[in-house]
Amino acid sequence: MNDSLIGKYDVAGPRYTSYPTVPYWDLGSFSSEGWIRTVKRAFSHGDSPKEISLYIHLPFCESLCTFCACHKRITKRHEVEEPYIRSVLQEWKLYARTLSHVPRIREIHLGGGTPTFFTPEHLKMLIDGIFKYAERTETFEFSFEGHPNNTTTRHLETLYDLGFRRVSFGIQDYAPHVQRAIHRVQPFENVREVTEAARGTGYTSVSHDLVFGLPFQTQDDVSDTIAKTILLKPDRIALYSYAHVPWMGGNGQRGFREEDLPTGKAKRKLYEAARKRLEEAGYTEIGMDHFAWPSDPLSEAMDNGRLHRNFMGYTTTATSLMIGLGVSAISDSWYGFAQNVKSVEEYTGLLQNDILPIHRGHILDTEDLVIRRHILNLMCGFHTSWKNPDMQFDGISEVLKKLEEPLQDGLIHRTDQAITVTPEGRPFIRNICMAFDLRLQRNKPETRLFSSTV
């Protein structure tokens, strides 16, 4: 990779799990009533009417991982489990009441935090409670995030019996000095055992989540981690760029210094070395930061133009309505976003009074909706076109000006009505999407809001 391009494009930018990105939501015009109207619209008239996806945020962890920027609550008090699940089910009940028909759930993802902080019995209570007010679609995909140190055979079997077939394990890196720095110590044998246990239980997709750019991480560390990962042959691999955002309150990114982090060219070389090894082993690169076997549904979705991206990352499942349940969870009706409050106490207090625990949100205007489709096209297929009238918008001339530099640098090919990202441009896909982000262009932040794009 061209080192000069890395230096040039290594700027702060969004990861585009949504558009508009959260810092540019129009909070002033948002209301819970307006949000619920978009929920009803998506449920009744979207591309997949009466089908929904659920993201359920389970925020508790027993210890703090210092690389993590997620919303979480650190505690060893497991008596918090049942009251929290009852609150989540109350939130789901309030949503179900607003819908005109019994919802059919196509996708459930349990994220965190640490979902396997919860006992198998409480996870069963959660899923059984969800289906008191819903049905499954004929084909569905249920997945959860598991911690290799505390995911038991009972967790795997209980969730399998409830319909779960996908599990992702957070690995990050196997180097002991890196694990100590990020306060996430888990031996390779733990990962081997839980991976084999998942397959033995019948899970058809086991994913491993890795992170590059961690403190003290070297080329040798990444090479060793990739070699160990290949030995276990996970069906999918997420190779995330460490997002260093210490200015965000409560993220726990401490215990190391800024100068302990590989950045810029050094950081990107970690990814390139990992990508080369994974492709040599037979994996296919999917979108940004993801890999899968060529026969995996994620690879097939990319090849067939069905790959989708939302707050849960890349997925083969696209419903018009994704409801996020739990503290800080974000919901997406395509026409709007809503995020829940971030405090467990405030969350449970609102639900005790039958109030949806919404903290903020955004209703997309006409321009937002078109730009969202362009960015989604780029993130999932590295191509977008404004040939059709429904893909045109007044700000396209502003976008084309921003694309001049990537064009000259060979990152994109452009015709009068379309752009295609070149292989050389794929590492800079976030930068290319930023050209379409008119809310970002028109309201440059005075302080840093995002992690580095490279």
Image: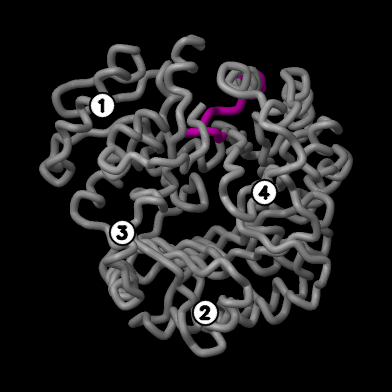
Q: Where is residue 253 in the image (x, y as percent from the top left)?
A: 68, 44
Q: Is 93 situated above or below 427?
A: below
Q: Any magenta on residue 280?
A: yes
Residue 96 or residue 101, whichever sits in front: 96
Q: What residue type is labelled 4?
A: Ser
Crowd class of label 3 (few under 14; some 14 to 19; many from 20; radius 10 Å): some
CA distance for labels 2 and 1: 43 Å
Relative image position of residue 321 (x, y in whole percent): 38, 64
Q: Name the residue under label 4.
A: 168
Q: Which of marks 2 and 1 is nearer the N terminus?
A: 2
Crowdedness of circle 2 by 10 Å Cα count: few (<14), some, many (20+)?
A: many
Dot 1 or dot 3, earlier in sequence = 3
Position of 22 relative to 375 (above/below): below
Looking at the rendering, the stretch of residues picked out in magenta corresponds to: 276-290
Label 4 neighbour load within 10 Å: few <14, some 14-19, many 20+:
many
Please name the colour scheme applied to the rendered image.
one colour
- What is the three-letter code of the residue carrying label 3? Asp
Q: Earlier in the sequence, mark 3 or mark 4?
A: 3
Q: What's under tag 1, amino acid-wise?
A: Lys
Q: In this view, does 207 lie to the left or right of 179?
A: left
Disc 3 or disc 4, which is closer to the eye?
3
Identify the residue under disc 3: 26
Q: In the drawing, what numbered circle is on residue 283?
A: none
How far is disc 2 from disc 3 in space, using C-alphas? 24 Å
Identify the mark nearer the N-term, 2 or 3.
3
Marks 1 and 3 sit apart, C-alpha to C-alpha, by 24 Å
Question: Which is in the foreground here, disc 2 or disc 1?
Answer: 1
Q: Name the residue under label 2.
A: 91
- Find numbered disc 1 in the image and state the secondary structure of the residue it sits on: helix
Separation of marks 4 and 1 at Cα, in angstroms: 37 Å
Query: Could you tell which of marks 4 and 1 lies nearer the N-terminus?
Result: 4
